[in-house]
Amino acid sequence: MIEINYRREKKPLPVRGAVVEIGFGNGDFLIRHAMENPDRPHIGFEISGISIAKVVRKARRMGLKNLRVAKIDAYWGFYLLLPDESVERAYMNFPDPWPKKRHASRRLTNLENLYIFHSRIKTGGSLILKTDERFFVDYTLENAEEMGGWEWKVEENALSEIPTKYERKWIEEGKTIYRLTLEKVGPPSKKIEIRHIKEVEEVPHMRTEKPRFHPEELSGKVFRLPNGTVAKFFNMWRGNGEYLLETLLVENGYEHYFMTRFRKKDNDWVIGVSPFSEVLKTEGIRDLILWLSGRDL
Ligand SMILES: C[S@@+](CC[C@H](N)C(=O)[O-])C[C@H]1O[C@@H](n2cnc3c(N)ncnc32)[C@H](O)[C@@H]1O
């Protein structure tokens, strides 16, 4: 399977010396890199489902055996799927720059992301960023300097063996292209607070006489639970003594999207995650089910 089903896959993946691309877009770079380095495992993280589908199709057609991709935010991809010190090189080609100051936390090289990338990159390995935005290089360098454990060099208009779609576009427009190579040279000198989520063996189906809410009250509502997670309930479908509620649970910045199911059984309700929902089993989801069924957290 080229596409990583990160909800079912054993985590972290058993990889060593991997090449990772963060936000691979149309996949030109990742696919060619994987083709030219058949002995290295290649992994791509993307949030765009269309990009994932395209790359899976191309890689399958080409019979690539050393490439896997996952539809996941790069932070959580590194956090959940990659062992410490398992990445030889991580490429970040032309990330969205988010130029406004108030959007700085969305930049892919924010301190927290850089910290998790650093932990998964092996000592002597590197993170290679290409961008047409000088401020993005400076922002990344400030963060790298603050956390420590990196050495770096910046090059201008360094020729790429594999130019990406965005790179071709910016070159055509006559822009300067910057390449920042951050080499991991040791442990960080500063501890950075990062977000965590913890997987659990099972998320229970709770049988309860009086749930905290009747499912019909929930649609369209938002709750902050005592453990800090935020649950939003959208559409609801009803039939055969059961209710399915479209649910978004934000657990330490990780967004779970699934159906919560309320089933009537005798005088009780059975509350759980619909078996048709592909979702990570985490403490946050388990606690949501406990909380909905009336248990105090
Ligand atoms: C400007 S495009 C560059 C695409 C490609 N690297 C190129 O150079 O042609 C940025 C890409 O990063 C992806 N992306 C944005 N945020 C991401 C995240 N948190 N994790 C993984 N991919 C992300 C976007 O979906 C988009 O495909």
Image: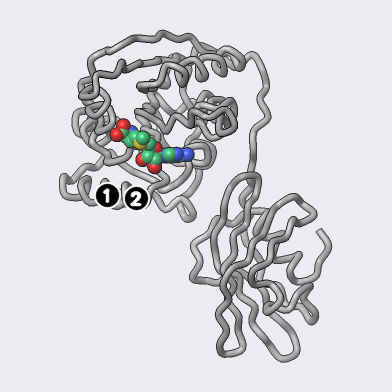
Q: Can I make out residue 40 in this image?
A: yes
Res 132 → quadrant:
top left
- Judge whether 231 appears above or below 70 on screen: below
Q: Which residue is mark 1?
A: 56
What's the CA distance linking mark 2 and mark 1?
A: 7 Å
- Asked if residue 97 lies left or right of residue 197, the reply is left
- Categorize mark 1 by other alpha carbons within 10 Å: few (<14), some (14-19), many (20+): many
Residue shown at 48%/42% (left/top)?
73
Q: Residue 267, how many percent across, how many down?
A: 75, 89
- Asked if residue 131 lies left or right of residue 262, the reply is left
What kind of residue is marked 1?
A: Val
- Judge whether 4 appears above or below 218 on screen: above
Res 142 → quadrant:
top right
Marks 2 & 1, CB-CB < 8 Å contact: yes
What kind of residue is marked 2?
A: Glu
Q: In what quadrant does ligand 1 lie?
A: top left
- Categorize mark 2 by other alpha carbons within 10 Å: few (<14), some (14-19), many (20+): some
User: In which quadrant of the rendered image does the C terminus lie?
Assistant: bottom right
Q: Which residue is mark 2?
A: 3
Residue shown at 77%/51% (left/top)?
227
